Image (cartoon, rainbow, N blue to C red):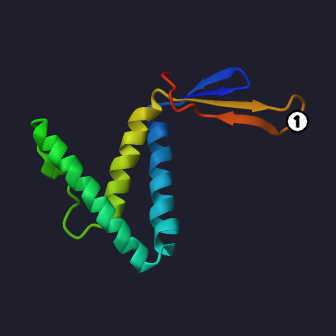
Amino acid sequence: MIIDFDGRVLTVPAHVEQEVINQVYAMIKDKVYPQIPQPGRIAMMMYSRGKLRDMEIALNAAGYDGKKVRPPTGDDPNLHYLKIMLAETLRDMSNAVLEITTEQGTDTVKSFSLPIDNQG
């Protein structure tokens, strides 16, 4: 990832990108997910299992072992799917440029941009 801070370009090393993803996962797992009522989690599990099944089918069709996307026995499929999606996010971060502009002479952020179609 690149951070453009008022024209100053900063490179974020891969290990720092990984740490950001780890912290996001921990925050969701430990703070956000426990607050979701059980019926909501069960509904989410149906979605997560469906997406994991779709991934497995696609991987098998491409000649890979699709079983590798299955959550380990006893693991929550929602959290497992989250890990996979965050890993995809990490892969995409290498092409991302976060642009931050501040108000001249202040400590106020004027704009914050992370273009979706950013190619690095």
Q: Position of residue 23 (x, y in %)?
A: 50, 52
Figure quadrant of residue 53 = bottom left
Residue in the foreground of this view, choosing between 72 and 65: 65
User: Can residue 64 be spotted in the picture?
Assistant: no
Q: Residue at x 78, y 38 (%)?
A: 109
Residue drawn at the location 47% of the way across and 26% of the way down: 95
Q: Position of residue 41 (x, y in %)?
A: 39, 72
Q: Nearer the viewer, residue 17 or 54?
A: 54
Mark 1, Cα crowd under 10 Å, few <14 / some 14-19 / many 20+, is few
Expressed as whole percent of the image width and height from the top left, the position of residue 82 reads: 38, 55
Q: Quick check: 53 above or below 100?
A: below
Q: Could you tell whether 30 is left or right of 2 in the image?
A: left
* Image label count: 1
User: Seen from this angle, which residue lies furthest bottom?
Assistant: 38
Residue at mark 1: 106
Q: Quadrant of residue 90?
A: top left
Drawn side of residue 53 relative to residue 6, left or right: left
Amino acid type of disc 1? Thr
Rendered residue at 46%/68% (across/down) = 33
Q: Is residue 102 left or right of residue 73?
A: right
Residue 106 visible to an observer of this rendering: yes
Residue 87 in percent (x, y) is at 36, 44
Q: Is residue 110 above or below residue 49?
A: above
Side of 40 relative to 67 (left or right): right
Disc 1 is placed on an element classified as: loop
Q: Residue at x 45, y 50 (%)?
A: 22
